């Protein structure tokens, strides 16, 4: 739903000292020691709060993703601060702003937060939002950690922009692992005609096209509700591999159309495994699809995943596709602040603290690549067993971070 002026003016929701969440497990970074600088957000003796702005899709077509991100961020903040909600005695205060998936609203919210002296922004459920907020962060020298937004262009966008999730190239490398030698194969990408879909088409052309495949695309307007014509086009293309890249609340209509057009019996279909609520949508075809996966609850078996699962469960929910993105973002925020004694005064120092940082995340070992701020991480091959409400994911293979790593992007500045 649209973001009203009243919504923009509402008081920020703050959470600090998250006593209800899980305590930090052994092995995470220790909190920094008090610094000598003073002023708001500094590491001085005043211990003033550090403000973090979350600009994400609380409403709109990606609201389910935004909810997961927020739940993960809360759990990650508790985990990384040992349940105190503070870094070196400075409470971390978080302001939530709803962009509803609209880049213009996101830019307005980001500018508003920056005007209120927020030096750290995170969120961006949608790729189109991240690509607009990133330049605003650079212009104002504000640390920006993008979330579920997958567009490859977010990597290397500028020196102040990072990401806490995967990117389209990593999805594509995971998809490529299903077909072996791509030379001479025909690949069709079925996607929405938006930043996310276009990024997937570009990534498939780059990866599989570069390996000798012929790549074409069927793109549907994001507003389309009758998706049968696009399913028909995809089938008529007669590809060796149909790569489906889709996000949002029209997924049900898409899979219904693909089922009705009997696409699954005509070609090998690879797609990303979406949120748990989407599993029943595949119906009897579920076990015929090869899924690449960013994350599903229980995929990794790490200490951080257990902590996240416990914290989210206490809040009455379950981890899902983008819960780790929020958790990772909180880990990154806390690490950057710890490296600067709880101070957000020097954004360049926050950036420096994150560049090249390797840490234990929900999915395993994660690394912020110094050259372009790509987040190197493992991906998963997954199968669904059962159908309908009984469909359950199983990780068939974990693809190591180096196998799915994107090429180094040239940072714009």
Image (spheres, helix red, strand yellow):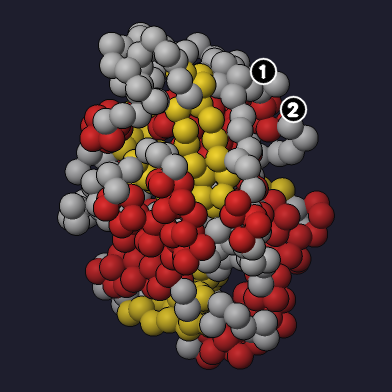
- 215 on left or right of 48: left
| Depicted 345 relative to depicted 152: above or below | above
Q: Which mark is residue 314?
A: 2
Q: Earlier in the sequence, mark 2 or mark 1?
A: 1
For mark 1, what is the residue? 19
Given residues 13 and 205, the one toward you in this image is 13
Query: Is there any visible trace of residue 296 in the rendered image?
Result: no
- 287 on left or right of 30: right
Tag 2 secondary structure: helix
Mark 2 or 1: in front is 1
Instruction: Locate residue 63, reporting x and y percent.
Output: 64, 57
* Residue that sits furthest to the right in the current view: 389
- Cα separation, mark 2 vs mark 1, equals 11 Å
- 95 on left or right of 136: right
Q: Which mark is residue 357?
A: none
Q: Residue at x 57, y 16 (%)?
A: 84
Tag 1 secondary structure: loop
Q: Residue at x 56, y 77 (%)?
A: 222
| Depicted 193 relative to depicted 93: above or below | below
Instruction: Locate residue 373, reporting x and y percent.
Output: 28, 44
Q: Residue at x 51, y 50 (%)?
A: 55
Query: Is there any visible trace of residue 268 in the rendered image?
Result: yes
Rendering quarter of residue 61: bottom right
């Amino acid at each position: 739903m649209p973001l009203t002026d009243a919504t923009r003016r509402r008081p920020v929701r703050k959470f600090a000292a998250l006593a209800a969440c899980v305590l930090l497990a052994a092995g995470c970074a220790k909190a920094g020691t008090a610094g000598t600088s003073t002023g708001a957000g500094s590491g001085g003796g005043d211990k003033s709060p550090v403000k973090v702005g979350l600009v994400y899709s609380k409403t709109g077509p990606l609201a389910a993703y935004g909810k997961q991100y927020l739940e993960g961020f809360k759990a990650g903040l508790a985990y990384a601060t040992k349940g105190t909600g503070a870094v070196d005695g400075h409470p971390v205060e978080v302001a939530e702003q709803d962009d509803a998936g609209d880049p213009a609203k996101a830019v307005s919210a980001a500018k508003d937060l920056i005007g209120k002296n927020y030096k750290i922004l995170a969120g961006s459920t949608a790729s189109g939002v991240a690509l607009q907020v990133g330049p605003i962060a650079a212009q104002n020298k504000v640390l920006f950690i993008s979330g579920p937004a997958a567009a490859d262009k977010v990597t290397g966008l500028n020196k102040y922009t990072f990401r806490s999730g995967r990117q389209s190239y990593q999805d594509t490398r995971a998809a490529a692992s299903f077909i072996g030698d791509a030379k001479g194969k025909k690949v069709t990408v079925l996607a929405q005609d938006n930043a996310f879909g276009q990024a997937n088409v570009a990534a498939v052309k780059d990866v599989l096209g570069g390996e000798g495949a012929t790549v074409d695309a069927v793109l549907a307007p994001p507003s389309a509700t009758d998706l049968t014509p696009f399913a028909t086009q995809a089938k008529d293309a007669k590809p060796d591999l149909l790569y489906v890249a889709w996000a949002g609340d029209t997924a049900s209509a898409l899979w219904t159309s693909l089922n009705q057009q009997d696409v699954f019996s005509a070609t090998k279909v690879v797609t990303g495994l979406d949120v748990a609520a989407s599993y029943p949508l595949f119906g009897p075809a579920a076990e015929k699809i090869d899924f690449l996966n960013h994350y599903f609850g229980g995929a990794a078996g790490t200490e951080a995943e257990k902590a996240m699962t416990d914290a989210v469960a206490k809040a009455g929910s379950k981890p899902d596709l983008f819960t780790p993105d929020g958790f990772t973002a909180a880990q990154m925020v806390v690490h950057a602040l710890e490296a600067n004694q709880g101070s957000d005064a020097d954004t360049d120092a926050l950036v420096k603290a994150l560049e090249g940082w390797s840490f234990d995340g929900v999915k395993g070992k994660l690394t912020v690549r110094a050259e372009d701020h790509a987040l190197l991480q493992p991906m998963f091959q997954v199968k669904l067993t059962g159908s309908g409400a009984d469909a359950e994911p199983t990780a068939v293979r974990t693809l190591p971070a180096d196998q799915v790593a994107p090429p180094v992007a040239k940072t714009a500045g």
